[in-house]
Image: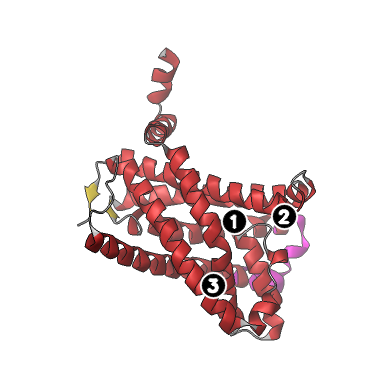
Amino acid sequence: MAIKDKLSTLPVIGRTMEAYDRYTERNGNFASAAVAFYGFLALFPLIALAAAIVAATLSPGRVEELQKNISNQIPGIADRVNVQGLVDNAGEVGFIGGVLLLFLGLGWVGALRPAIREMWFGDQAPPDGIEKTVLMKAKDAGTLIGLGLAMAVSVGASAFATSVIGRISHSIGLAEHPLGRWLLQAAAFGVAVLAGVVLFLYLLVGMPRLEMPRRTALRGALIGAVGFELLKILVSKYIADVAGKSMYGAFGVPVALLLWIYFATRLLLFCAAWTATAKHPVDRK
């Protein structure tokens, strides 16, 4: 007990322990499992819808680039997405994916938003009455659209910056040297983290409709973005080296993706607990 008290006085370790205590006290693991279930179900119509919309506007030469970008964002799934088939059937895929995404996405938002707010305010009572329920679903639909825009900005900025870095490095021959390749990897990681900050800011502030000091929000988003990129690297390596060869057989990759969503949700809720314990919350009306 004395050791824990000493550790709690250290700046970084103490803040981490305080946030983790809040996370565990408010059933973070249980909430993460519920959110991950909806997230896993919504993932595939989201990929189908996004790829169908974007792929329909691309030239044939850029379809392969799109598939690579999907691989960078969602580990292990690119080789299982037939992007050319999405191009050929963009209308049907877009409609079906949109309907499924709306239904499943509302369930995901409806599970995630109260889980984040619980880290701040404790148990959240569900809306009472049909009118309040419909109003909440309408707000969740707007939140889902906002999330799509945040993801588009995040991925677009990351792709643009990575392209610029690649062109500059190619023009000066940086990629031909071992140190240059390491610098390029570090730059790509940094760009991905900055793009992730945009996404986590929306998830921590916009989605749960909270107000907090700007510095607290930025620090929480930065923790989430760095952790998310490290998690993607680990999951990509796991899928490449283990999942496809495990006893799960054909189910290896879906199981790995489910675990990835679960741990990503745990990371998000921990960041919410970290921001909640940094300052006293002020609820947004």
In front: label 2 or label 3: 3
Identity, as a three-letter code, of the amino acid under mark 1 = Phe
User: Residue drawn at (42%, 51%), measured in percent from left and top?
Assistant: 221
Image quadrant where one finds the C terminus? bottom left
**For mark 3, what is the residue?**
97
- Can residue 185 be found in the magenta stretch? no
Instruction: Tell me which amino acid carries mark 2.
Output: Leu
Give the structural element (helix, strand or loop) at label 3: helix
User: Taking the image as drawn, is residue 177 in sight?
Assistant: yes
For the magenta stretch, what is the residue range?
164-180
Which percent across, then down, holds residue 248?
74, 46
Please indicate, yes or no, whether residue 233 appears anywhere in the rendered image: no
| Magenta: main secondary structure | helix
Residues 106 and 118: in front is 106
Mark on residue 71? none
For the residues labelled 3 and 1, the Cα–Cα distance comes to 31 Å
Q: Earlier in the sequence, mark 2 or mark 3?
A: 3
Q: Report whether 175 appears left or right of 146.
A: right
Please check the rendered image and state whether residue 166 is part of the magenta-colored stretch, yes or no: yes
Kindly identify which residue carries mark 1: 189
Q: Nearer the viewer, residue 150 or 39?
A: 39
Kindly identify which numbered label has been placed on residue 179: 2
The image shows residue 11 at horizontal and vertical percentages of: 39, 31
